[in-house]
Image (spheres, rainbow, N blue to C red):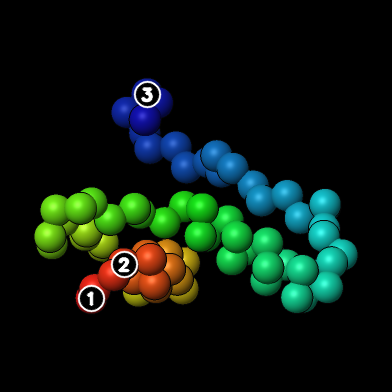
Amino acid sequence: MRDGRVEVQRYWRLDYSEKLDLPERICAKEMLGRLAGSRAHPSRERGAARAFLSGGVDSSAVVALAAEAMSEP
């Protein structure tokens, strides 16, 4: 807000100038590796693992990887 007026301006812009030119299988392997590294590590206490899902592919993938790492549902 400036002088009692709301000012609308862009505060960021995506830069698409640098593009990766890699095969899809390499990109998928890299993404899976990064997601696996970011998953929550369940506690030993029963029922301690929690997740909030946004409904997006990224949060669903992280929860799926965490579920694989658990010994029970």
Residue annotated with mark 3: 3
Q: Where is residue 37 in the image (x, y as percent from the top left)?
A: 51, 53
Q: What element carries label 1?
A: loop
User: Which residue: 39% across, 72% down?
Assistant: 68
Q: Residue at x 87, y 65 (%)?
A: 21
Under mark 1, the amino acid is: Pro
User: Of helix, strand and loop, which one carries label 2?
Assistant: loop
Q: Which sits earlier in the primary sequence, circle 3 or circle 2?
A: 3
Near-viewer residue (73 or 22): 73
Mark 1 Cα shell of 10 Å, populated few (<14), some (14-19), many (≥20): few
Q: What residue type is labelled 3?
A: Asp
| SS at badge 3 | loop
Instruction: State the separation of the CA atoms marked 1 and 2.
Output: 7 Å
Residue 38 picture location, percent across and down: 47, 52
Give the left or right position of residue 73, taking residue 9 as reference: left
**Residue 67 sits in which quadrant?**
bottom left
Q: Which residue is drawn at 29% across and 70% down?
A: 71
Mark 3 or mark 1, which has the lower sequence index?
A: 3
Observer-nearest of 57 and 27: 27
Q: Which label belongs to residue 73?
A: 1
Circles 1 and 2 in contact, beta carbons < 8 Å: yes
Q: Is residue 53 visible?
A: no
